[in-house]
Image: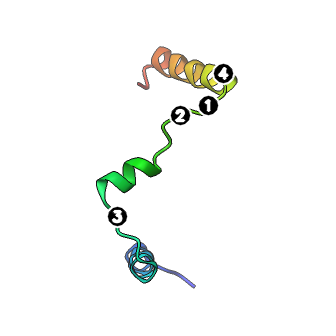
């Protein structure tokens, strides 16, 4: 079975409406990962990724 992206998104919108979920900028910001609970190990890993990306000219 092949489903198009527009059909998938329509289904998601319908389910959200049925559940009473209303997307607002505030709700979206609240759901984003702020990184406040990251471990020191994860922060170091992300810093290494950032540095390597800059060195490679990706960022």
> Which residue is found at the position 35% from the left and 69% from the top?
22
Q: Using the numbered discs, state the Cα–Cα distance from disc 1 to disc 4 in whole angstroms.
A: 7 Å
Image quadrant where residue 6 sits: bottom left
Along the line of sight, the residue nearer the viewer: 44 or 39 = 39
* Of pointers 3 and 1, the one earlier in the residue sequence: 3
Q: In which quadrant of the rendered image does the N terminus lie?
A: bottom right
| Residue at 30%, 53% in the rendered image | 25
At label 1, counting other C-alpha atoms closer than 10 Å, the crowd grade (few under 14, some 14-19, many 20 or more) is: few
Where is residue 13 shown, x and y percent of the image? Answer: 39, 76
Q: Please report contact status of discs 1 and 4: CB closer than 8 Å, yes or no.
A: yes
Q: What element carries label 1?
A: loop
Q: How far apart are marks 4 and 3 (CA)?
A: 32 Å
Q: Which mark is residue 38?
A: 1
Instruction: Give the position of the C terminus as an image quadrant.
Output: top left
Residue 49: image quadrant is: top right
Up the image or down, 43 lies above or below 23; here it is: above
Residue highlighted by disc 2: 35
Q: What element carries label 4?
A: helix
Q: Which mark is residue 40?
A: 4
* CA distance for labels 3 and 1: 26 Å
Name the side, left or right, on which 51 lies relative to 20: right
Question: Which is more N-terminal, label 4 or label 2?
Answer: 2
What residue does disc 3 label? 23
Q: Which residue is drawn at 41% across and 71% down?
A: 21
Bin the neighbour count of mark 4 within 10 Å (Cα to Cα): few under 14, some 14-19, many 20 and up. few
Category of crowding for the residue at label 2, using alpha-carbon neighbours closer than 10 angstroms: few (below 14), some (14–19), many (at least 20): few
> What is the C-alpha distance between the residues marked 2 and 3?
22 Å
Q: In the image, which disc is placed on residue 57?
A: none
């Amino acid at each position: 079975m092949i489903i198009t992206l527009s059909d998938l998104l329509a289904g998601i919108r319908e389910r959200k409406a049925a559940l009473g979920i209303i997307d607002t900028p505030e709700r979206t910001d609240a759901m984003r990962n702020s990184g406040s609970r990251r471990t020191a190990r994860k922060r170091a890993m992300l810093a290494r990724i950032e540095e390597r990306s800059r060195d490679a000219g990706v960022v």
